[in-house]
């Protein structure tokens, strides 16, 4: 996870934390630190991490698997940080994917043309209640993501070509990749599209050599959806911020 977070981002070792900074976005979910294994940060370490993000006008954040540094959460809470959320981490082993296939009237494609990439990103943004305004820079960034080994899938109406949803997965690093950003527009929900997107991406990562494919569900409904595709809980992740 540290290697994946560092790919394409600026990094700085701040005490027992690997701090990562997106070069083109202030999105807090793209700017966060990960503590070293077994880290027990001091007040000074926590203050240094806070300054590193505030100097860049970013929200100080950390994301990590609780079991890798159980003392880090306690130390950060004592230093004034707060828990944003605690979520399960789910894994899907090779050969475990339950592939439902695309629902009737929906096709799944790897976006290649600019209009396909634009449609996928717009559908994802709308699904996550963000403005569905996609710039040329957004399209170029996603195209570079694919060129660098990342994965993406567009779900669209097979007749009209209207984008229904999409999802992505990180490039495989040391046999590991994260599936993320799975979103479906409101008018297309409850048809099995989210499950189909998840299965498509997971199978693609497995085919590319991914042995440890993981994701983090946003809530209980999403967890049940992913369980239906073949994912199982395997620990917890905590997000904290200052």
Image (spheres, helix red, strand yellow):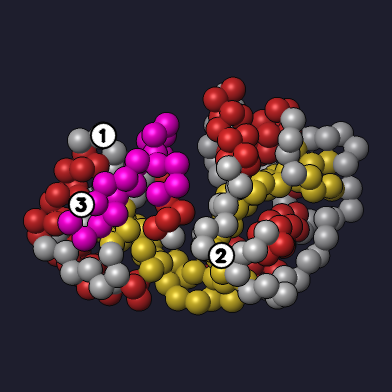
Task: Choose top left, top right, bottom left or bottom right for residue 212.
Answer: bottom right
Q: Secondary structure at mark 2?
A: loop
Task: Choose top left, top right, bottom left or bottom right for residue 99.
Answer: bottom right
- What percent of the width, then of the height, locates residue 89? 49, 69
* Residue bearing mark 1: 57
* Separation of marks 1 and 3 at Cα, in angstroms: 17 Å
In the image, is residue 4 above or below residue 8? Answer: below
Residue visible at 84% across and 55% down?
103
Q: Secondary structure at mark 1?
A: loop
**Highlighted range, magenta:** 6-29
Q: Nearer the viewer, mark 1 or mark 3?
A: 3
Q: Secondary structure at mark 3?
A: strand
**Residues tagged 2 and 3 counted as in contact (Cβ below 8 A):** no
* Separation of marks 2 and 3 at Cα, in angstroms: 27 Å
**Residues tagged 1 and 2 counted as in contact (Cβ below 8 A):** no
* Residue bearing mark 3: 14
- What percent of the width, then of the height, locates residue 165? 70, 45
Residue 28 falls inside the magenta stretch = yes
* Residue bearing mark 2: 175
- What percent of the width, then of the height, locates residue 16? 21, 60
The numbered dot on residue 233 is none
């Amino acid at each position: 996870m540290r290697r994946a977070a560092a790919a394409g981002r600026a990094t700085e070792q701040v005490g027992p934390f690997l701090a990562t900074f997106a070069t083109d976005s202030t999105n807090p979910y793209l700017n966060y630190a990960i503590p070293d294994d077994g880290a027990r940060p001091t007040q000074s370490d926590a203050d240094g991490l806070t300054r590193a993000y505030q100097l860049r006008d970013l929200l100080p954040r950390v994301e990590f698997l609780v079991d890798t540094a159980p003392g880090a959460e306690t130390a950060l809470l004592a230093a004034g940080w707060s828990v944003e959320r605690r979520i399960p981490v789910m894994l899907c082993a090779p050969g475990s994917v339950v592939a439902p296939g695309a629902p009737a009237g929906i096709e799944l494609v790897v976006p290649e043309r600019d209009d396909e990439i634009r449609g996928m990103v717009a559908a994802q943004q709308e699904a996550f209640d963000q403005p569905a305004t996609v710039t040329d820079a957004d399209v170029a960034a996603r195209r570079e993501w694919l060129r660098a080994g990342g994965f993406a899938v567009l779900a669209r109406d097979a007749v009209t070509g209207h984008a229904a949803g999409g999802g992505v997965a990180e490039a495989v690093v040391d046999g590991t990749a994260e599936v993320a950003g799975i979103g479906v527009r409101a008018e297309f929900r409850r048809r099995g599209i989210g499950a189909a997107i998840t299965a498509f991406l997971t199978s693609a990562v497995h085919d590319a050599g991914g042995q440890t494919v993981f994701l983090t569900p946003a809530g209980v409904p999403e967890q049940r959806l992913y369980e239906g595709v073949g994912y199982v809980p395997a620990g917890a992740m905590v997000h904290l911020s200052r």
